[in-house]
Amino acid sequence: MSTLFISDLHLDDSRPHITALFEHYLASDEVRHADALYILGDLVEAWIGDDDDAELPQRIARATRAVCEAGVPVYFMAGNRDFLLGETYARRAGLTLIEDGAVHDLYGTPTLLMHGDLLCTDDTVYQQVRRQVRTPEWKAQVLSMPLEARRALAVKSRAESRAYTSGTQETLMDVNADAVAQAMRNAGVTHLIHGHTHRPAVHHFALDGQHAERIVLGDWYEQGSTLHVTEEGRELRTLRA
């Protein structure tokens, strides 16, 4: 048996082949016979609320609900693009919501699970914005807007994000080694899985005299990226669109 991880799919109507790849993957025997499926944030390019009546959220819900009904728990952790996803949609989609920074046991190995953006502490501008938009007051204000206004806000926010990203040094947008070490110390673990940076890799390093491992999930912009965890080991895999 295996436990599967994905993140940073950024599903969007502009890339229908990736949505189709996601649906095909969730319908596969690998997923339907897994111990669990984890989605560690940024499932979509932008989430405007659980009441979104567009087709894409409905397709996603059908795909994840089918996995849940097959007996495979589907855990969802919010990322920086879909932190407005709430309990209403989670129930409809068969998702079990988990907090950023949760520790889950993977075949006897306690493992810290994060989206990853909290580890990018060198990007102080991003961290300031993140704190602002995660407040209950900001969320309530946005979710009280009409759907069309939220859609327009999402388009504006994506454009601003692209402009900021293109003008920011890549090193600032990667994780900070000290932040990684502190997060793992706080959680009492030597294994970490996260996404966000779109730099899939397995990093081995020393943490307070112990061997530690950090696995970074890849994005789904041009192809799929998954992590396959078993009792024997962990393997990053690529899915061709």
Image (cartoon, grey):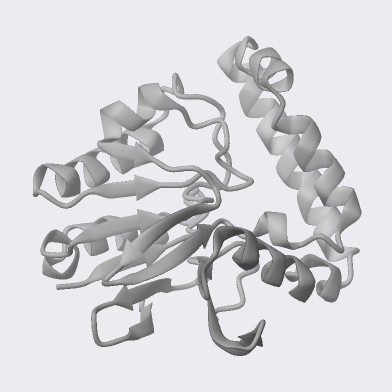
Q: Is residue 241 visible?
A: no
Work out which quarter of the rendered image holds the C terminus and state it: bottom left
Estimate the x, y position of residue 168 in percent, counting from the top left: 89, 65
Above/below status of 188 relative to 79: below
For residue 179, side relative to residue 77 (left or right): right
Above/below status of 59 relative to 133: below
Estimate the x, y position of residue 85 in percent, counting from the top left: 49, 32
Residue ID at (46%, 23%): 52
Work out which quarter of the rendered image holds the N terminus and state it: bottom left
For residue 173, side relative to residue 51 (left or right): right
Q: Nearer the viewer, residue 109 or 18?
A: 109
Above/below status of 136 relative to 188: above
Q: Nearer the viewer, residue 86 or 10?
A: 86
Residue ID at (34%, 63%): 105
For residue 61, side relative to residue 13 (left or right): left
Estimate the x, y position of residue 117 in percent, counting from the top left: 68, 56
